[in-house]
Amino acid sequence: MFDNTLKDMRQSIIDGAPDTASSLAQQALAGGIAPIDAINNGYVPGMHDVGEQFAKGQMFLPDMMASAEAMRAAMAVLDPELRKLGTERPMAGVVVLGTTKGDIHEIGKILVGTLLTAHGFQVHDLGVDVAGEKFAAKAREVNADIVGVSALLTTTMRSQKGVVEALEESGLRAQVKVMVGGAPVTKRWADEIGADGYAPNAMAAVELARQFMQQKSQTVVELL
Ligand code: HCB
């Protein structure tokens, strides 16, 4: 039964059907499917199918927009459930999050922010099309531990390097860890641009953020 629901979730994204996506999310919660399983095994695979069909010329921009709308409808139901977990935890660290300059893809970044919040991180989401300087200014303002930068286009992933550079120029690089992600991003790319880590999905982003916080607390102990 779970498998069928997950299949229907995937199809609701391919069909770009927000009402179906939303009611399946409600059914999932009522039926005991964990929100994160619904996202990772139901809706996100649908997004991947859409991306592949778009690349092959079998789907067009309006279809991709409708799919994004369906994903947002599902997230609107699941997001509050995921966030509830975070209120019961001690604050794990401060994260500034955004999608890089020239890029308006936001679904993955929002998911990363939701899961970080659910695991006790305080998240400041700058939105989309964010320049490096803006990341650095916010990091200074909120005394961030981590900056998370999303990029979905091969053209805009280059701007992730701009974020690392902006942090260097503002003298914050030593105290702020940089985590990059997004469909075209790899560990190799993260190394190449001098980021501290790469996360392939939202749960991996939480794990990486936790590792960063452990490293930071060890450095403080060593300094004492
Ligand atoms: Co868009 N688009 N798109 N798109 N789009 C992609 C990204 C393509 C790969 C599709 C394709 O060709 N196969 C492609 C990019 C090709 C490339 O550069 N190599 C593409 C293109 C070309 C474009 C336009 C240029 C199309 C056009 O106008 N002709 C245009 C660009 C506009 C711009 O940004 N300037 C465009 C527009 C759109 C929208 C607006 C229709 C819509 C976005 C809506 C929105 O976000 N509000 C859209 C969508 C939905 C997609 C696909 C289908 C899905 C993206 C998505 O939401 N995935 C995507 C295909 C794909 O990615 N396979 C396609 C689901 C999320 C959950 O995954 O990878 O974003 P994610 O995030 C993960 C993971 O990467 C990681 O955790 C997340 C959660 O698990 N992560 C991080 C992400 N950020 C992180 C940051 C961290 O610090 C740590 C981890």
Image: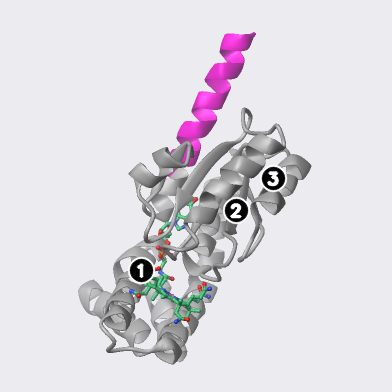
Residue receiving disc 3: 136
Left or right of 188, for residue 78: right
Residue at image position (55%, 56%) is 113
Amino acid beneath label 1: Ala
Residue closer to the observer: 28 or 176 = 176
Amino acid beneath label 3: Ala
Residue 97's disc number:
2
Q: Residues within 10 Å of mark 3 (few under 14, many from 20)?
A: many
Residue at image position (42%, 77%) is 25
Cα–Cα span, label 2 and label 3: 11 Å
Residue 214 lies in the magenta-colored region: yes
Residue 38's disc number:
1
Q: Which residues are magenta?
A: 207-224
Q: Give x and y (percent) for residue 2.
A: 25, 73
Left or right of 46, for residue 93: right
Compared to residue 186, the image places residue 72 above or below, namely below
Q: For the image shown, how many numbered marks are present on the structure?
A: 3
Asked if the beta carbon under badge 2 is closer than 8 A to the nearest atom of ligand 1, the reply is yes
Compared to residue 32, the image places residue 85 above or below, namely above
Residue closer to the observer: 61 or 109 = 61
Is residue 190 something one can see in this rendering? yes
Q: Who comes first in sequence, dot 2 or dot 3?
A: 2
Q: Give x and y (percent) for residue 165.
A: 60, 41
Cα–Cα span, label 1 and label 3: 34 Å
Q: Give x and y (percent) for residue 76.
A: 54, 75
Q: Residue furthest right?
A: 141
